[in-house]
Amino acid sequence: MPKRTDIETILVIGSGPIVIGQAAEFDYAGTQACLSLKEEGYRVILINSNPATIMTDTEIADKVYIEPITLEFVSRILRKERPDAILPTLGGQTGLNMAIELDESGILNELNIEILGTKLDAIHKAEDRDLFRNLMYELGAPVPESDIIHNMTEAKALVARIGYPVIVRPAFTLGGTGGGICYNDQDLEEIVTSGLKYSPVTQCLLEKSIAGYKEIEYEVMRDAADNAIVVCNMENVDPVGIHTGDSIVVAPTQTLSDRENQMLRNISLDIIRALKIEGGCNVQLALDPYSFNYYVIEVNPRVSRSSALASKATGYPIAKLAAKIAVGLTLDEIKNPVTGSTYACFEPALDYIVAKIPRWPFDKFESAKRNLGTQMKATGEVMALGRTFEEAMLKAVRSLETGQVHLELKHAEDNSDSWIEKRIRKAGDERLFFIGEALRRGVTIEQIHEWSAIDLFFLNKFKNIVDMEQILADHKNDKEVLRTAKRLGFADKKVAELWDTNEATIYAYRKENGIIPVYKMVDTCAAEFESETPYFYGTYEEENESIKSDKPSVIVLGSGPIRIGQGVEFDYATVHSVWAIQEAGYEAIIINSNPETVSTDFSISDKLYFEPLTIEDVMHIIDLEQPIGVVVQFGGQTAINLADKLEENGVKILGTTLQDIDRAENRDKFEQALHEIGIPQPLGKTATSAEEALVIGKEIGFPVLVRPSYVLGGRAMEIVYNEEELQHYMENAVEASPDHPVLVDRYLTGNEIEVDAICDGENVLIPGIMEHIERAGVHSGDSISVYPPQKLTQAQKDTLVDYTTRLAKGLGIVGLMNIQYVISQGEVFVIEVNPRSSRTVPFLSKITNIPMANIATKAILGKSIVEQGYPTGLAAEQKGVFVKVPVFSFAKLRRVDITLGPEMKSTGEVMGKDATLEKALYKGLVAAGMEIRTEGTVLFTVSDKDKDEAIALAKRFSTVGYRIVATEGTALSFEAAGVRTDVVGKIGAKGQTLLDLIQNGEAQLVVNTLTKGKQPARDGFRIRRESVENGVPCLTSLDTAEAMLRVIESMTFTAEQMPKAEVVH
Amino acid sequence: MKKRLLILEDGTVFTGTAFGSERASQGEVVFTTGMTGYQETISDPSFYGQIVTLTYPLIGNYGINRDDFESITPAIRGFVVRELAKIPSNFRCDLTVDEYLTSKDIPGIEGIDTRKLTRIIRNKGSVKAILTAADEEVNVEEIVAKLQTTPAITHHVREVTPKAAYPSPGRGKRVVLIDYGMKHGILRELNKRDCDVLVVPYNTPAEEILAWHPDGIMLSNGPGNPEDVEEGIETVRNLIGKVPMFGICLGHQIFSLASGAKSFKLPFGHRGGNHPVKDLRTGRTDLTSQNHGYAVDIDSLKDTDLELTHIALNDGTCEGVRHKKYPIFTVQYHPEASPGPEDSNHLFDEFIEMMEVEAGKGKQHA
């Protein structure tokens, strides 16, 4: 069927900020979709609030709106642009929910706008549990015994009928927010209450748990002519009971016979046909390991995280084709973009095995509950390909960048046998490693199967890995054994440990003996047809298919899995760097391990190597490709951390040299450099032991900011207020040593400023200066960032430009750099210099129209800023105000303290732009998911040191008509200052307490500041968690509160103008 | 672990680990891309005379069970995989692949770069090969020379067709199933529809078949070159127009040749479970299970009474025909699946309907 000619303009809805459950995969899907629609000649308009994405680059769509994805703003764009259709199925749950809201508001009917892809009734049928179950019943597809409940009474009645365990799945939430498995009455009470709260329709599905079944997924596609195919099937290593986003997944299925496979394939196709989806769909099934019994668990009538994984796992670009199908093209007329010779209407055949492991944020959130269940907790994932299961799994393990390169725990010997059993029985993020340890201790696979219900097939593979450790240990310097171990995916580092030598020796030994990997192509067809996809993975086989071209090449290292502190921003810069390298006439080669991203779309670079970002795996590729150099400054800390080893191996680091990188990152060298350049920084020193830290603390005076060197996202960074806290920090939070020094700095309060700059060695271009709303002490990634700065004097700006220029030149920067300053009592201090791309690069590039990563890359390759046609110095300020507002995923992570501090906690960001700061902030806050009300109740619980400032805020809240509520102490000081305040009881007090206030929805806003240092006072912690769990914005910085207040004040002002207008009517 | 060699006629030598039978074996090496269904593949008689390699690297994961055989005696000459599961895991598993192949005296090799092998086959087309123990005496040059001069085997069907007719009774339509090397799946589908089936050897004369008063005739799949099956072609020629017919794979080719069309050898065949086939009448594409090295020449259909009904989406070759006058249709692919997608299972229903319509006509005439 030819594509539709009755539509011209299509509005694509993006997925908004990165949150747990909805991450970079939608940047990949959305980018593909927009380009795919443009390719077909449609005019594409995009709305997405997330500035950190490739998708929101102006080249991706004809018109890009970085605006909040809310009914208000999307409606406004619809009215302005009058598209013929909207495509909501590529923007995750956000896109689907927006489509439903738009439809219900009547605007789609009014403007005669069609929904492409999946029709609304199909969305309802797949998402509304009742309708879904009815549909499954019609199709004869079994679903677990279950019922919809709307309150606790109904929940209890149902459990009385079907018994425990039951799974709670709140309707219309993403990543399963608020759900869980209940084993008893107490669980039921807790989880159902939270589930009902999170469901926008106050509806939960309670379902008989089928935990222990095999969890199988099918990624299916269908077109308007009813052609339907399965792109990929996947098997979760973790049985049913753990959210698929939190499960270790392999593709294709491993333990299913053809009959089981065809049975599940048939029902998946029946479902997509019954829903009449035109595009992609994900079907999750549970299969009894002991019979042909199966259940349909869930259907996602849209492109999903799993479809991004399936696309990368097979090479089949689901989102790209889903977009083409949405405009009427059919699978049998679209060419398979991988082979270029066959058609899209086929099912990829894999000749390798794919392993995906989620990346969890528990390294940052040590207090968080690490148990895994139906609510997703991972922020990202890695994928690895291999020709053996063991190889794919071990490659995935080392792609995680958690310090492990093998199936082992960091301090294995500290774990008792019973603890290991416990951690295998109850799934958590480290279960895989506990299994490795159990096997090492001689626990049988049958026993582990009994504990975990993980299939014996997988356990046996893990056992092969553990068995090989012993074989290696018994056969030192045996090259045949080494070859076998490499075919099982062993890292050189692990082999070196077993052979009592170092990694480099093993690498050299292998090269001498010809034990090196070859690269196989991912071609969708298992080599049946000739393909030219430049998409490769490494494995230990005979035939290499990746042939070095004659063109000089540059390798760009990607940023690995998305984690807190290293998000999609780094992928953005990586992709732009690749494009710039190509523009400069080189072949651009990328290495990355993250299946969710745009950078691992094989059509982006000249060659994609889907490999772990470890020195061993990267060096293999460099040996083969012989690039002119490697670019490390765009892949975040992942890539930077490889720089020294690359140089040791004789690889040229393009751009800022290793010595200069080290000069910026090594504290002592940095201090010396600053001294030489003559730029002030807060007093501070490096400590290599707890004792030393205490001496430094006393010397420079508390409060001090402490952190390990070489980290990203402020990991383990804290502000400590006295010796005792410092002692505690040094003993518990870090392991200080001469190799891993800890930085102790004087903590200066003041206005925090962030500057990104490009240097070509001679000149410096500063696209813009950004100012933080929150004072220094809150991590820059968690602060609201404002462009252009609103509070700076011209003299301060001049100083910043001067310092930045001198720093760039003085530190020998070639490429990008990022500097954080604090202005304390009018004086400018440097806090930190990052000799690499930063989180703010996409934001700043977009608002200033200066393609920073592109210019930087070309500068690295030898073309000066001036030659590129750009000015030097500070670029002219843009009109309007732009804010970057962080977005958090606290609702998904139980027991995490939400207080803002030096350690980064946000998972994503949004942008707000408008003529004034207040309007931009309004958009930013709304886009970040906060509801801003012009009236209501604000609850204050602030520490003594903040009382004076809080009084000023309370006054202003009161003036705009907010009711002020506070606990006794705070209320007294407020009243004393003349602010009318209602008193509410503290936690545990008689009568109404502040927790009741939050739970009952009486407070619309909570302002809570820490009583002291980090030690979270239990009450404060509970207040903050209670707010998160009840969806009440809780502001832990008075600066954020002030910003919100300014917005409210500006809104109230206009509201007062309205009555006049009414009189005229 | 014993070493074993897979030597190709072009001189390529793969060294791997032996499993299954200890004997040496020779045949045409072919690849199939199905990721599940190795048990069905091993026991599919259409692979007669062939050494089969699977492109998916992990084979044997769910073992061998009693249910999923497609014939009693596997006809493959050898089995080539990247990795064979030592400890399979599935509730139906009875044996490992190694145990099964050992019991059937079929040699296998594992641990080789099967993707390299696949690419050689893809680029060279038909490749003869030998599986042999890797001992000192192996003279590769001699073996290669022998392989190059050995003529390709012919008349495969004679080796896999039954010696005598046998019934598989039912109460529904009487179907004579001409067995050129049938997969059990075909019989299973007919039995599922309550057909009263009589399975007959490929060279059963037409009169003998008609004497059973069948409501329809089913032409099975089978191995090799359709041109070799002269007696079979003759039989089918004499049946055209007399009874409704449905043919699969080799059955489709034999029917086409009997109708005056021609066949040719494909460069490297269609083998796997992901082949899209377009139904030219409905415009819909089904994913199909395929296993054939020969195809019917579309150009040769123009002087016949046959109408092209299905084509392979990828290479445009003939995947199905229909007789313009009589109730006969045949397809190149496997609607009985096993292994592979069951999208075109409805063809068996169409066959039953066709027989019913014909029976109805008979009554009207009477």
Image: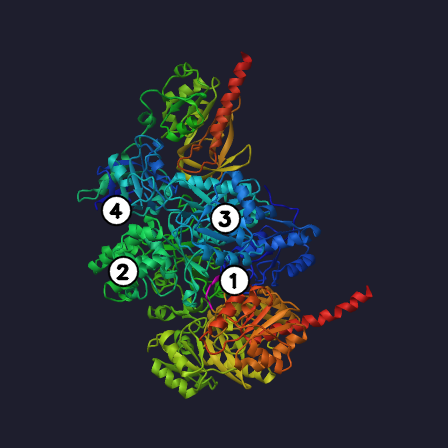
Viewer-closest of A598 and A159: A159
- In x, y percent, where is residue A621? 37, 60
SS type, badge 1:
loop
Mark nearer the N terminus (3 vs 1): 1
The local crowd at label 3, few if under 14, some if 14 to 19, many if 20 or more residues have their Cα within 10 Å, is: many
Task: Give the amino acid type for the residue marked by disc 1 in the picture.
Answer: Ile
Task: Look at mark 2 in the image and give the residue it sits on.
Answer: A510
Q: Which mark is residue A158?
A: 3
**Residue positioned 51% across, 30% down in the render:** B308
Task: Look at mark 1 in the image and give the residue it sits on.
Answer: A18
The local crowd at label 4, few if under 14, some if 14 to 19, many if 20 or more residues have their Cα within 10 Å, is: some
The answer to whether dots 3 and 1 both sit on one chain is yes
- In x, y percent, where is residue B80? 30, 42
State which chain disc 4 sits on. B
Query: Which SS does the magenta portion mostly show?
Result: loop
The answer to whether dots 3 and 4 both sit on one chain is no
The residues colored magenta run: A889-896
Instruction: Kindly report the distance in space between the C-alpha atoms of the residues bearing marks 3 and 4.
Output: 62 Å
The answer to whether dots 3 and 2 both sit on one chain is yes
Task: Give the amino acid type for the residue marked by disc 4 in the picture.
Answer: Thr
The answer to whether dots 2 and 4 both sit on one chain is no
Viewer-closest of A247 and A504: A247
Viewer-closest of A1019 and A105: A1019
The answer to whether dots 2 and 1 both sit on one chain is yes
Task: Look at mark 4 in the image and give the residue it sits on.
Answer: B15
Instruction: Kindly report the distance in space between the C-alpha atoms of the residues bearing marks 3 and 1.
Output: 36 Å
Residue A893 within the magenta-colored segment of the rendering: yes
Mark nearer the N terminus (3 vs 2): 3
